[in-house]
Image (spheres, coloured by chain):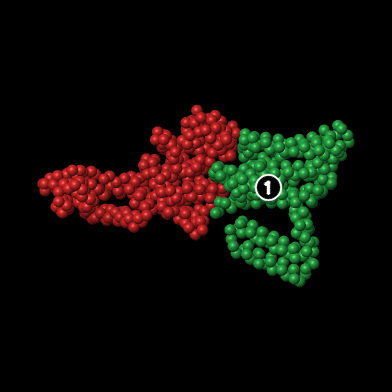
Chain colours: A green, B red
Amino acid sequence: MLAIYKKEMKTYFNSMIGYVYLALAVAVLSLQTYMNNLLSGSSSIANTLSGFFPMIALAVFVPFLTMRIMSEEKKQRTDQLLLTSPVSVEKIVIGKFLSLATIFAMEMIVVALLPVIISSYGKVNFVSSYTAIAGYFLMGLAFLSLGFFISTCSENQIIAVIVSFVSFVILVYLTSFAALIGSSNRAAFIVAMVIAVVVCGLLYYMLNNMVIPIAVFVVAAGILAFLFYKKESVYDGFVLKLFSALSPMSRFDTFISGTLDLDAVVYFISFIFVFLFLSVQTVKKRRWQ
Amino acid sequence: MIEVKNLTKSYDGHLAVDDLSFSVKQGEILGFLGPNGAGKSTTMNMMTGYLSMTDGTVVIDGHDILEEPEEAKKAIGYLPEIPPLYNDMTVNEYLKFAAELKGVKKSDIPEQLNKVRNLTKLTEMQERLIKHLSKGYKQRVGLAQALLGSPKVLILDEPTVGLDPGQIIEMRELIKNLATEHAVILSSHILSEVSAVCDHVMIINKGKLVVADSPENLSKHLERQGEVSLGVKGEKSRILSTLNAVIGVNRVEFEKESEGIVYVTVYTGKEDLRESIFYALATAGLPIFEMRVVSKSLEDIFVTLTGDDAKEAEKLMAENADNEETKEGSEDAADKEEE
């Protein structure tokens, strides 16, 4: 595991990706700080981190960091070295993810200095500042884990970048999509059906078996339709509830408002765990094809 | 050291590897022979745990590859068909990474690197970036990686591809030397290589075992049939009847006739009939313009066994079986005579 971690760190800083990523991410975060804190004389780092540029740093730059992490191994056939060595797939995935987390942590060290710098010009609420920074860090790790999973699925780095970018944008604007879809129960029913299809599609992808996903879908669709015709009230406000339950932004907002919410921490940790688990399963599953 | 039983792999109902069983002991070299796409690489990938099998078991040094993957993989050094190299690393960086990955003790790493660099003659190239190396050197780096940690089993997928003739000879010597300490399996589609290096040969086609024997026995089997190609001036029917009358000739096949010269192929038994053919034709007043022994090699058995002409292959296999029976039969007869 340590060998893989060291190798990844070396690769990022031998190939410039690491430096370019850090330079760009720190530059846009600093730009937001300049606009929010220096120009308008605010001392709140929380408002800075929830601004436009920090979101760009996550949605646009993170895909470039994660794109190669697994897809390149597959393309160069170096996965044959890793997977035939006496190291488990779990350790390979964790080693690689830790290297991504380390690079992201380097970026956060710079961000962590900002409240200290600003404090020399006036009063800074350190507790709420560092809560917000912790929230940004957790959300970044969550995005890294999703980007990691997407890189595991594709041999092509360009596809990995594009799919990651689109997924991140959807995640950031998830609650806005809820408003777009509307609050009618019919829309809620359709959304629930779409989710059933997606879940069964994932099941099919993971199991390579048609029978189980179809059976699950028939049962799920039956229950959903039954509820829709017999007890429509179940769908009241379903879309909004569901989307905000899934949205990382609603969790991030609790950090921004300065409260360290246990639910939000658990949400991000589960998010990371789920996508790393899916990555491990995807690598293992490839052996069976 | 290596026990493979009923190994099978199917992709969507198509059998890539069909019920292969074999074992290799320490000090032995087993050669997999087969045309491209015969299932050699798939078999090796299953043995090393990169792919999983549809059916069957692989036991390496007493550890099942599926049940105790880490223990089994520790005993394997694997050089895949395309060496798994990181182009942006230097040779040393790469070998150090591979050693750490294989769990070689930190204090042993410098000594191990030194050893494999010397064995594969990479010492001069150790500071070069892998992407700047030639194909032959890349192959050596791949082999060096497989040797790290002194694994008990070496699995080499086409180890001499991309090497120049001098390097091929070096590589063969190296593999032969390695076999004293390791059990080695190598694959190739070049017969001379397998016959030069291996103790045992398995010819595989379309995932199935066609024949398994030592290279000596395989060539002996072929020597039983001889072929003489002839160019004779004269009348076709007379030439054919004269040749057919020679004792020991099994069959004469007419090839072509051009400018009054008749070209034929004479199929004989084991013995060299060139002298008798010469005298027979000379007595008949038919001048020989050309005479040449068509030597059969392992290449021929390979082509016959793995070619599309499956019937011919079956015939050869059957002949092989008959042969063994007659051998036993003659031994029996010999016993009786003694009585």
How many numbered callouts? 1
How packed mark 1 is, by other alpha carbons closer than 10 Å (few <14, some 14-19, many 20 or more), is many
Residue found at x 74% / y 36%: A27
Q: Secondary structure at mark 1?
A: helix
Q: Residue furthest top?
A: B124
Taking depth in this image into account, of A111 and A276 the one nearest to the observer is: A111
Left or right placement of residue B217 versus residue B48 in this view: left
Q: Residue furthest right?
A: A123
Q: Give the chain letter at badge 1.
A: A
Left or right placement of residue A9 versus residue B191 in this view: right
Residue A45 lies, in percent from the top left, at 82, 40
Placement of the C terminus of chain A among the 4 image quadrants: bottom right
Q: Amino acid at mark 1?
A: Phe
Left or right placement of residue B2 versus residue A125 in this view: left
Residue B155 at least partly seen: no
Q: Which residue is mark 1?
A: A165
Residue A225 lies, in percent from the top left, at 71, 68
Residue B18 lies, in percent from the top left, at 45, 55
Residue B240 lies, in percent from the top left, at 17, 52
Left or right placement of residue B221 versus residue B34 in this view: left
Taking depth in this image into account, of B212 and A216 the one nearest to the observer is: A216
Residue found at x 82% / y 48%: A254
Residue found at x 22% / y 52%: B254
Above or below, comparing residue A120 to residue A77 in the picture: above
Q: Residue furthest bottom?
A: A230
Residue found at x 59% / y 43%: A72
Above or below, comparing residue A222 to residue A155 in the picture: below
Placement of the N terminus of chain A among the 4 image quadrants: top right
Residue A123 at least partly seen: yes
